[in-house]
Amino acid sequence: MARPLLDTVETFTRLAGHNRVAMLLFRLGDGQAFGINVFKVREVLRRPRLERMPSMHELVAGSFDYRGSTIPVVDLAAAMGYPPLATEDGAHLIVTEFNRSVQGFLVSDVDRIVHVDGGNLAAPPPALGYGPRVNAVTRLDGNLMAVVDVEQVLASVDPRVAELSERVQQAAHVQQASNRRVLVVDDSLVARTQLVDLFRKMDLECVVAKDGSEGFDMLRNLAAGPASERIALVVSDIEMPAMDGYALTRAIREDTQLRHLKVLLHSSLSGVFNEAMVERVGADRFIAKFQPDVLATAVLELLPA
């Protein structure tokens, strides 16, 4: 039984290195298809019996024992404006792991896994009304598929502040870098805000891009301009529409004007897979989200002296 699973994981790994991503499709109450990166998914279950406390956030349907640990369950349907699923016996639970935490999301139905070309993923037009909880859309067999920004959903339930230890803050203020301009590339509004807040506490100047394609265009334009406007370090997410973090790193390494840049990949997807891909595409460092002190220390080490 182990071999088919390993074959599947290896297939997804090869896809991820070529600006392609495997998505688990699900629905929240009607025919609209939503997706989540399969690397965030641990397991899909029928809705278990949930325990709820009166003080829980309104989007938290409850908690349950998952393999010996108590994990929160977020009603993703309610978070996206659909009727709640907390009492629906037919609902499914997607158990996820990212940002170094495990949690569950209630959905009405789970469909299948599809392979998506990152170049076909685009930011949703505001007129669609998704707001910040969808960070990309594409077409599958002519039908719309929306990629849920689960980091943003979790942040609305459990907002976190980018706190730096006094030791790291002092090191950031003392360090004399010749260039303190950092390009932040991330399709998640929550992640971009966290990073910009963190880097400002370190007295770094931030330039922001919403995906790898936009980030690469910025880098090329800035490289052709005054030296004072050039970027010293790129801190990029991995999962992004148009051009992902791996493809962005490859493009930087293949560009004669940009190949000297330090690139730090910063992702909610942790594990040995990312460590291997970082080396393969030529990135300088990988840091799992969101560890302020660890990230800040790596940034200080990579900035030019």
Image (cartoon, rainbow, N blue to C red):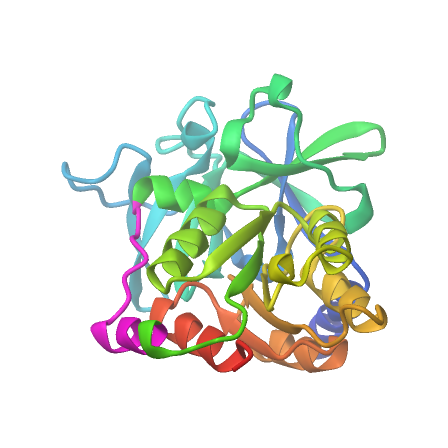
Residue 11 in sight in this render: no
In percent of the image, x 70 and y 76: which residue is there? 277
Residue 279 in sight in this render: yes
Q: In the image, is residue 6 above or below residue 133?
A: below
Percent across and percent down for residue 302 are 54, 79
Camera-side residue of 169 and 92: 169
Camera-side residue of 71 and 134: 134
Percent across and percent down for residue 147 are 62, 40
Span highlighted in magenta in the image: 158-172
Which picture quadrant has residue 225?
bottom right
In percent of the image, x 63 and y 79: which residue is there? 284
Percent across and percent down for residue 144 are 73, 29
Horizontal relation, residue 5 to residue 73: left or right = right
Percent across and percent down for residue 55 are 14, 39
Camera-side residue of 135 and 23: 135
The quadrant of the rendering that contains the N terminus is bottom right
Q: Residue furthest left?
A: 54
Q: In the image, is residue 178 above or below residue 135?
A: below
**Residue 165 within the magenta-colored segment of the rendering:** yes
**Residue 227 within the magenta-colored segment of the rendering:** no
In percent of the image, x 58 and y 78: which residue is there? 285
Horizontal relation, residue 298 to residue 252: left or right = left
In percent of the image, x 66 and y 30: which residue is there? 124
Which picture quadrant has residue 300?
bottom left
Horizontal relation, residue 13 to residue 151: left or right = right
Q: In the image, is residue 231 above or below residue 302?
A: above
Horizontal relation, residue 103 to residue 120: left or right = left
